[in-house]
Image (tube, rainbow, N blue to C red):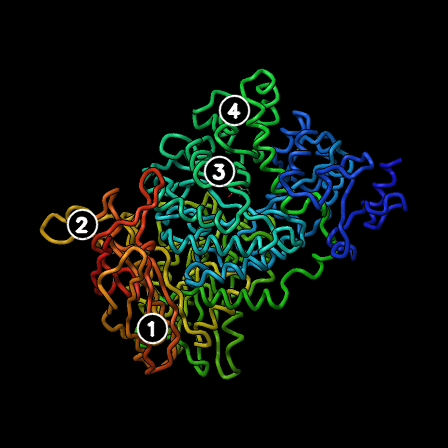
Amino acid sequence: MRSVAFAACLFCATTASAADTNIYHAGPSSPLASTRQAWIDLNKNEKKDAYEDPSRPVAKRVDDLLKRMTLDEKIGQLWQVNYDTNADKTFAEKLKRGAIGSFLDSSALIENPVMRNKLQHIAVEQSRLGIPLILGHDVIHGFRTVFPIPLAEACAWEPVLFERTQTIAAREAAAAGIDWTFAPMVDLARDPRWGRIAEGFGEDPWLGALAAAASVRGFQGTNVADPDRVVACLKHFAGYGAAEGGRDYNTTEISEFTLRNFYLPQFKAGLDAGALTVMSAFNDLSGMPASGNRHTLTEILRGEWHFPGYVISDWAAVGELVDHGVAANDADAARLGLTSGVDMEMVSTTYPDTLAQQIKTGKISEKVLDEAVRRVLTVKFEKGLFDHPYADETRCRTAFLRPDAIALAREAAAKSCVLLKNENGVLPISKETKTIALIGPFAEDAEELAGPWSSRGHADDIVSLAAGIRAKLSAVTQLTVVRGCSIIERDSGKPRRHIADSTKITERPTGASEIADAIAVARAADVVVMALGEPRNWSGEDGSRSTLGLSGRQQELFGAVAATGKPVIVILFSGRPLAVPEIQNKAAAILEAWFPGVQGGNGVADVLFGDVNPAGRLTTTFPNSVGQVPVYYNHFSTGRPGTGEYKGNYADGPTAPLYPFGFGLTYTKFDYGKVRLDSPMVKPAGKLVAHLMLTNTGSRAGTETVQLYIRAIAASAGTRPVHELKGFQKILLQPGESRDVTFNLSADDLGYYDTRGNWLVEPGKYQLWLAKDSASGQPAGFELVK
Ligand code: BGC
């Protein structure tokens, strides 16, 4: 009797018969959802059991449910499967047995929740206990509204921008039936050869921590059960960004001291902001793969940080413990994964294949399993999936690319731009210019602007640079656009792929006269803009590079155009810092636009024509050459830092980077006065107050990002970096305007971790800079007294 009555009720989202008046499905679309307490008879026994009762505390609901579960049902909760358009058929039998806890949509082909709901209906209505699935997907920088890549957005030095963009990303993804995003990626990266540098926030743990927390707030909001929110996942725990040689998936060797002070703070900040899940990484971390690493996954994450959520492995990373050579077979891998702290296995099948037997034979204690299941269930309850398992299938019709999303995408694209050079004020371009030549393979290629991991971005939603520039110009300006060369030459590296379906792009090879045509167009123009860069899929996962220049024949194209003697404005599209000293030498202006997303052309044009003043600052150092890598601002001092003959400099090229961390120009000039301290002594409970008189000495308004760096002169538990970012302020000043910029620093801002994770704030001497980037300014000394 019950299955018919309840199934009907669940499908049509209306109240059931009089006898069941308090049993109904109140999905987000139900008008009843907000007005009355819903509960679903998940185990179909016609009574409201504790786990079905939304008024009970989550912990009690989990306890009750766990007690009812068989061994196989528990293991099922720990397995995540990739789904496709046939999944309701392929996985029906497993779903009915409760053998799957979660699906992920890795293909990103799915834009509506229809399949998700079909799978959920089977899990909820046709399995014994009706435990809902949780559906995950990589929503990295937008869903359908593609925002700039995270590395770009980090350059806005405005953490709340992440909160705003990820709020919209969550709204769109949730409308497509996604409950959980595998983001933010908070891996610190110091090596631009590593393609996933694009997905993170750069090389600074302090700034990265702010971005991580803001991203989590954006995805999860204040109530993750809100149908517009998704569960966040901090990844990749831990150390993935330190891949040797910048080669993806490669070994990392990180001391405990460096791990604690550089690679972990972003995770901690994300957890403090409430992130409910964490993903274990692919890499070997100092001799033990991160997905079998008890030290990081259990001792630190659970033991020290008391993380209550669950850990999912990266894709097949538990199965790969065999390839790493720390597990002899799948059973070993599953045991190592689970007992180290990986609760849910993504895609590989070692948990479903081997855990039951290992628990029955006592090789793994059922307590360990129960703990993992408890964590998974807790998050599912927190997300509200037991009470609202289905996604509204109508919302996706109107959820994407809404005007507020488009406006924010444009704002973010403009704010992400970093002006790297601007000789003789060639930028901004006057809208009255008579002829503009726009040259380069990125001029009209909209698709590339999406960048890697662009989720459900559509190529035809994206505004190209040419379109963005065209929209700025009046009828008097003649804009001539020529490609000049292709983005990659045939067989010159990883082929480019379409964002829609990942099929290979067959590129028109560079024509015999294309470079000559570009030269002619440049000669005839008043202003020459070049759109250059690297293919979007040369960054992101498995997007490592061994060189850091422009791809294909773009360098040759640039050289030929620059040789005309015309001042050349270069716009760079890239997912990483490029080593382009020749462009720095020869271009009149350089604007790093990264991969700016769906409104890229408009956002970049806003900056080019001065409707938005460039205010971005680098969060990652640009090397002069690949040989300098890794090069980052917050390094330790050598014993021979600057004087004397033996300094450790390169014999055959510069040691200093092309552009330092924090670097970025504006369309005006700022004068930095001397740093003034209210007092050079600060007590542990007190504050150091530092001032700087900042003056806009140029003729345009502009936003300056004043950066506060410190250095500890002597530390007892380990070496401290030569510079550490501890504060910044973005100050908008009109021409001629001055402002006393004041920073308050607390003793806690001076702290660091010892190798056991203790936070130390040590009395002693320090230096402080208030500067425009990490390589500028004069320090003021102060002392932290006992
Ligand atoms: C990536 C993760 C991603 C996962 C699921 C893996 O290959 O490393 O970052 O979340 O796939 O798509």
Tag in front: 1 or 2? 2
Q: Please tell me which of labels 1 and 2 falls first in the chain.
A: 1
> Which residue is drawn at the image coordinates 31% and 62% (left, top)?
687
Residue 460 vertical position relative to residue 236 in the rendered view, above or below:
below
For mark 3, what is the residue?
280
For mark 1, what is the residue?
567
Q: CA distance from mark 1 to mark 3?
A: 49 Å
The type of residue carrying mark 3 is Ser
Q: Can residue 719 be seen?
A: yes
The type of residue carrying mark 4 is Arg
Is the CB–ligand 1 distance for label 1 below 8 Å? no
- Element carrying mark 3: strand
* Residue 196: percent from left, percent from top: 44, 47
* Residue 462: percent from left, percent from top: 56, 62
Tag in front: 1 or 4? 4
For mark 2, what is the residue?
649
For mark 4, what is the residue?
335
Tag in front: 2 or 3? 3
Q: CA distance from mark 1 to mark 4?
A: 63 Å
The type of residue carrying mark 1 is Pro
